[in-house]
Amino acid sequence: MNTAQFNFNFSLQTLESHLPSPAESETLRKAAVLVPLLEVNGELQLLLTKRALHLRAHPGQFSFPGGKVDKQDNNMIETALRESEEEIQLLPDNVNIIGTFPPHTTFTGFEVTPIIGIIKQPFDIKLDPGEVADAFWVPLKYFLNPDNRYSAKYHRHGKTYDVHYAPYEDKFIWGVTAAIINLLCCHLDDT
């Protein structure tokens, strides 16, 4: 799938059948992530990061660039772009924002808003070692194959949750990151 096909499919679909469950608490910490895509040789690549091991929240997990909302952020798009610049040196003016998905909640008390963006030009990834241990590209077509995405029921405190998984090579992508990948793929493939 290239950028033109992505934009066409993305704009045609509705989200109603794929929305995550609404938040149950108003005490959730607000965060936003950028779901960055870059076209390489006619195929979109999805950029993911590995969180630094010393972080308090979700250490060592695979994620999208992003983080908590700061006071100076006017909206979730600004949060995602600011955090992406801090974490991997992706400049905001190098991203074309395509849209947003509804917030996802995590077991650890975050409400994460995914911001979908197309990277305009290749860039040199420079990791902030205080936040990110690694960054890597995955062909979007890998995740578009439903055989590469999984979900399972998880029981916690008397409630049942759908937990998503999307392993890639030696990387075990799960939780909200895998749920966002699944939502994106379902949204693009919903014909």
Image (cartoon, helix red, strand yellow):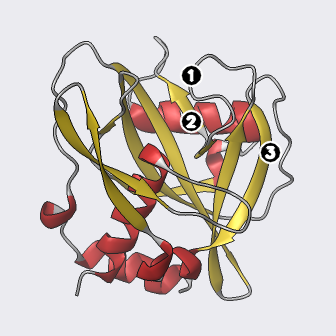
Task: Using the image, determine if residue 16 lies above or below residue 107.
Answer: below
> Of the residues tagged 2 and 1, which is closer to the observer?
1
Give the residue at mark 2: 66
Q: Quadrant of the C terminus?
A: bottom left
Circles 3 and 2: CB atoms closer than 8 Å: no
Of circles 3 and 2, the one toward us is 3
**What residue is shown with label 1?**
57
Q: Amino acid at mark 2?
A: Gly
Three-letter residue code for mark 3: Asp
Q: Which mark is residue 134?
A: 3
Q: Is residue 175 left or right of residue 133?
A: left
Q: Position of residue 174 (x, y in %)?
A: 50, 50
Question: For residue 44, which quarter of the picture?
Answer: bottom right
Q: Is residue 139 left or right of residue 183?
A: right
> Is residue 70 found left or right of 10 in the rendered image?
right
Residue at disc 3, secondary structure: strand
Residue at (61% x, 31% y) in the render = 83
Q: Give the CA separation, mark 1 to mark 3.
A: 16 Å
The residue at the point 17 percent across, 34 percent down is 159
The label shown at residue 123 is: none
Amino acid type, mark 1: Ala
The CA span between labels 3 and 2 is 14 Å
Residue 3 placed where, x, y %?
54, 79
Q: Position of residue 96 (x, y in %)?
A: 53, 58
The kind of secondary structure element at disc 1 is: loop
Q: Residue at x 78, y 64 (%)?
A: 122
Going from N to C along the chain, the mark reached first, 1 or 3, is 1
Q: Residues within 10 Å of mark 1 (few under 14, many from 20)?
A: few
What's the distance in space between the residues labelled 2 and 1, CA to CA?
Answer: 12 Å
